[in-house]
Amino acid sequence: MQIRADNEASRAASRERNREVWNRWAGVNYASQFYDVDGFVAGWRQGANPRRQHFDALEADLLGDVAGQTLLHLQCHFGMDTLTQARRGARVTGVDYSSEAVDRARELAQRLAVTEARFLCSDLYELPGVLDETFDVVFTSIGVLSWLDDLDGWARVVHDHLSPGGRFVLLESHPLVWIFDDEVEERRLDVRYDYFERSEPLRLEQEGVYSDPSAVEPSVTFEWAHSLSEIVRALLGAGLILDSLEEYAEIAWPLFPWMEKTDGGSWRLPDGFPTLPLMFSIAAHRPGAATP
């Protein structure tokens, strides 16, 4: 019992440290060219989002027609993807544990005059005590799973916030890409990290922010590796039914500085490298009949 209590306390401390980092990163990210919020707003007003055409189209395809449906976006950061689904007609609720990110999400919704979007600040694992609702769609995407220390708990939150017959969609970087050393500057892939989950998280130190390396924001974060089988097993164990699992040879950002950008705004390994899965998607649903 003491070992378990110590482990849970350690995970809670790591989670809280990460929350503090994301609170510091939120403002930097919002102002960065990496996210290009001004471009997003301008594109919105012109009827398009030029930020990442390929993956916006992929998300839309995975989610299907969301017009008139309720949608819960977990780990929404400052809400760009949440608001994209609002534009497609969904009644959206975005959740993030960073209060600074949630403040930026509300600010962005005001800039876009989206009055139907709702943003809540909550730790994901504490969400059932904050939000007593179910949704037609639960959605989460890109850069989310490595911050979760308990995938079984995450999958239960997904399941319990889905209405019977409701759909879950995940679009994420492939677990395989995180085994490579991202500090090697040469055009090569060196294996550095474990693929499978470990009992302890990786402790990572970085001087800048991923969206702006010039930002002086020394940070220590804690991240967890999750294999593809672990992710699927957690969702099945929570009672969801798997509808699709796809892998893609493109990724939404330049994971390595020598990657090549595609016409659709995604990134790929240069010619001469083996074809590897860089992202993946899962679509699943909660059993039961949807409410008419």
Image: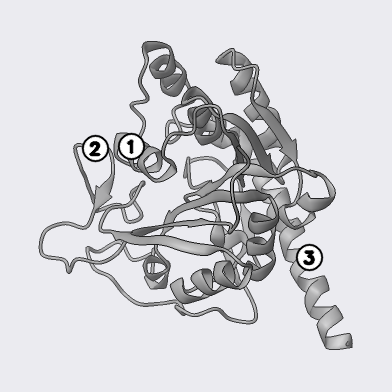
- The residue shown at (16%, 66%) is 273
Whether residue 20 sits left or right of residue 116 in the image: it is right
- The residue shown at (55%, 78%) is 197
- Label 1: how many Cα within 10 Å (few below 14, some 14–19, many 20+): few
Task: Give the number of the disc on residue 12.
Answer: 3
Work out whether 235 lies above or below 33.
below
Q: Quadrant of residue 262?
A: top left
Q: CA distance from mark 1 to mark 2?
A: 10 Å
Q: Residue 262, can we see it?
A: yes
Q: Which residue is mark 1?
A: 57
Across and down, in percent, residue 209 comes to 53, 46
In the picture, the quarter occupied by the N terminus is bottom right
Kind of residue sitting beneath label 2? Gly
Kind of residue sitting beneath label 1? Ala
Dot 1 and dot 2 residues touching (CB under 8 Å): yes
Task: Give the number of the disc on residue 191.
Answer: none
- Label 3: how many Cα within 10 Å (few below 14, some 14–19, many 20+): few
Task: Give the number of the disc on residue 264.
Answer: 2
- The mark lying in front, picked from 3 and 1, is 1
Q: How is the image coloured?
A: one colour
- The residue shown at (33%, 37%) is 57
